[in-house]
Image (cartoon, helix red, strand yellow):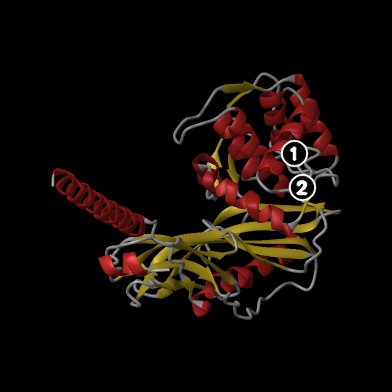
Amino acid sequence: MTTVINERRRTKAYLAGFVATILTGSILYGAYLYNRPLPEVKAIVSAKQNADQPGESVPIAWPAYGQSAIGMTGRGLLASSGTNQKPVPTASVAKVMTALAVLQKKPLAVGEKGPMLTVTANDVAIFNNYLALDGSLVKVAEGEKISQYDALQALMLPSANNMADLLANWAFGSIEAYSQYANQYAKAHGMTHSTFSDASGFSPNTVSTADDLIQLGLLALKNPVLAEIIAKPTANIPLGDAVGPIYNVNGLLGKNGINGIKTGATDQAGGVFLTSADRQIGDENTTVLAVVMGGPSLETAMRATLPLLDTASGNLTRKTLAKAGTVYGSYTAPWSKQTVKAVASRDVSMLAWKGDNYTSRIELRPIRGQQSDGSNVGNVTIKASSQESIVPLELKGSVSKPDFRWRLKRD
């Protein structure tokens, strides 16, 4: 009897253990199924929003001679005449680089006069040399003193060749050292087709292109001391009674919003004019630039910039590139079958050139599991020429959490 009872107990224990093993295995397997990593849900990108947008055809009143370009502060080059611009002599527009280089080497703050420069015998010899060549000058005498700021005024307003050499020799030790610095500075700032062989631009070996000169003008406007000087119609410098006031050879200053920059003319260069003008586009102010190289005369080149400035301002407009709520993609989670959209989180607009081509690059990250309304899921980068705006993309609506049954039964 005892043997039978023990056998029954062993059978029950075996069955209980077997059932426990099955239940434990089932629980563990269920836990494995439930805890498997959720699949990535990849976005479907909106083909409409991902498409590039071509710009408009923009008529521009280019001169029939030489080469020209237009630009804008905060933006850079807008357009240029022809596609194969070759470096040509700059004439005195090269003095913009001289002023920039000197101010890089010997910085001034607005309101500062800077150190005093003493006119040397070599400076007098340089004056006499330019005088014999019929170059633009301001008279100097050995031993006279002039501040750095006043020397820059003499350089930029009456376009004094001898002041270009005086400043370059003072700041760099020699014209050769100046040229080396200026050429490195030019390349570092995107002026890859420019060569500055002298400080005055009198040499035909100092060359550039219209595109590069737009960049040079933008750099000049960014320097507050130089921007102040190039906007002056006249100034007084203490170089003796024979000099008196000096006058800016840019006779268009103050007309049609023009606030700079530099004229130039030599037999080899013809007329060259780099200019800037304040413009109001809608309810905002900006500055547009124009340059003409190789004009039949300086006066002709100067006149030709006026319709170019009008073209630049007339073809700039505030353009909305993205609106809050615009759909750039969507997600459909397999556990809910519900589609949730990815939308722009804010409006983006820019002062745009009508001829620009716009490209959109949408980057949407895969998601996993539950996602709340407003979650950031990527960006759209909208680019037009040198301008770029990055707009965060967010979910419009929530992605629900997968339920217990779906977690267990999914493939």
Instruction: Please count the marks in the image.
Output: 2
Using the image as rendered, state which of residue 3 and residue 230 is in the foreground: 3
Answer yes or no: is residue 366 visible: yes
Residue 157, percent across and down? 61, 45
Using the image as rendered, state which of residue 226 and residue 134 is in the foreground: 226
Residue 393, percent across and down? 39, 64
Numbered circle sitting on residue 194: 2
Answer yes or no: is residue 240 visible: no
Q: Where 220 sits versus 356, above or below? A: above
Q: Amino acid at mark 1?
A: Asn
- Return the disc, 1 or 2, that comes first in the chain's sequence: 1
Q: Where 187 sits versus 42, above or below? A: above
Q: Residues within 10 Å of mark 2 (few under 14, many from 20)?
A: many
Q: Are marks 1 and 2 in contact (CB under 8 Å)?
A: yes
Q: Quadrant of residue 30?
A: bottom left
What is the C-alpha distance between the residues marked 1 and 2? 7 Å
Q: Secondary structure at mark 1?
A: helix
Q: Residues within 10 Å of mark 1 (few under 14, many from 20)?
A: many
Q: Secondary structure at mark 2?
A: loop
Q: Where 98 sits versus 325, above or below? A: above
At x 65%, y 45%, the residue is: 189
Question: What residue does disc 1 label?
Answer: 183
Numbered circle sitting on residue 174: none
Q: Where 266 sits versus 291, above or below? A: above
Q: Quadrant of the C terminus?
A: bottom left
Q: Amino acid at mark 2?
A: Ser
At x 63%, y 38%, the residue is: 99
Residue 194, percent across and down? 77, 47
Using the image as rendered, state which of residue 190 and residue 321 is in the foreground: 321
- Left or right: 394 as drawn, with respect to 12: right
Residue 337, percent across and down? 35, 77
Q: Quadrant of residue 76?
A: bottom right
